[in-house]
Amino acid sequence: MDAPLWTETHAPELSELPQTEARDHLERAVEEPMNLLVFGPRGVGKTAAAGALAAETHEDPENDFVTINVADFFGRTKKEIRNDERFASFLEGRSDLSKRGMISHVLKEQAAYQPVSGDFRTILLDNAETIREDFQQALRRVMEKHYEATQFVIATRQPSKLIAPIESRCFPVPMRAPSHGETVTVLERVVEREGVAYDGEGLEYVAGYGDGNLRRAILGAQTAAEEAGEVTMDAAYEALGEIGMGDTLAGILEDAENGAFEDARSGIDDLLYGEGYEGETVLRELLAVARGRYGGDELARIHALAGEIDLEMAEGTTDRVHLGRLLAELGR
């Protein structure tokens, strides 16, 4: 999608979160700031909930709310981290740091900043299931040192990956998948704010397409609106009923084969984060394209690697990292 994503332009306020239980916990945190562990399945709104909390809590959330996607560290090389404009200023003159040292340094610097307004800042650590245990120990020390001026919100699909000292320092906020009716309510609010025509059957269809993944449902509605100018049953079915990614994946595989790894991984990012596909879906479709492109030992090798990746993703680690490994192997 070339237009701004509706998931960003229509980020919910705290009162608009569809999960009542999580909303109650977060409203309590507005009155009584505390470290939070927000956990639940992919696409249920964990990141959006943290943003809603920050908007409610801080007078200047643009400066006092910081999001660090853990996958941006652990899924990248030292050079990629150093060249990222979000981290470059923290790492200038620090070429001797290990990758873990780079991550720890950025986190310490962010936690040490004084709030622009109010008494504290909020740091969201997103996709926290990818944090290695050695770094979790460093994170624990940062949390202990800066507890008075920094609130940590740790978002993850798999809280069991976190060490006990971190879990014990956070109030747990479980986020379930929204019900079908709750998803329809969110979609109705979004399309009305966009001024897009819709009907009830169209919203019902898109909610079913999301199947508990709120991000996927909202982006599905945006796809229908961009293609047909409305979110009706006919428009939604036309846009989403036969949706596929074969051509996109064929281009990604070609980039990987030619050694254009950054382009290939960017294509995967678009599918995972831009279009809202599950990693398992992308892997399945990738294998379908590969079967028409390779044969013999090469295809057998890809299937064996895909089996490893499928297991790793099922254990809760970041889909982007493991799909990227498959592409890197193809490039070799």
Image: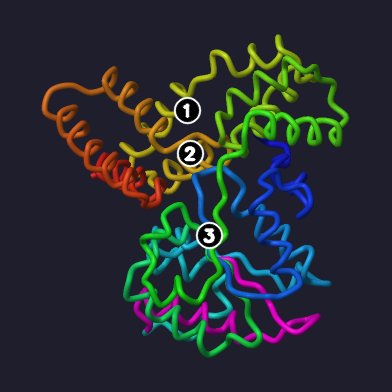
Residue 47 placed where, x, y %?
A: 61, 54
Task: State the residue position of label 3.
Answer: 155
| Neighbour tally class for label 3: few under 14, some 14-19, many 20 plus, Cα within 10 Å | many
Question: Foreground: 217 or 305?
Answer: 217
Q: Nearer the viewer, mark 3 or mark 2?
A: 3
Q: Amino acid at mark 3?
A: Ala
Residue 62 placed where, x, y %?
A: 76, 67
Task: State the residue position of label 2.
Answer: 267
Residue bounds of the magenta highlight: 97-126
> Could you tell me which residue is drawn at 75 percent across and 24 percent down?
225
- Relative placement, left or right, of 259 versus 67 is left
- Residue situated furthest top in the rendering: 234
Q: Which numbered marker is on residue 248?
A: 1
The picture quadrant where one finds residue 43 is top right
Q: Earlier in the sequence, mark 3 or mark 2?
A: 3
Q: Earlier in the sequence, mark 3 or mark 1?
A: 3
- Mark 2 in CB contact with mark 1 (< 8 angstroms): yes
Using the numbered discs, state the Cα–Cα distance from disc 3 to disc 1 in whole angstroms.
Answer: 30 Å
Q: Amino acid at mark 1?
A: Thr
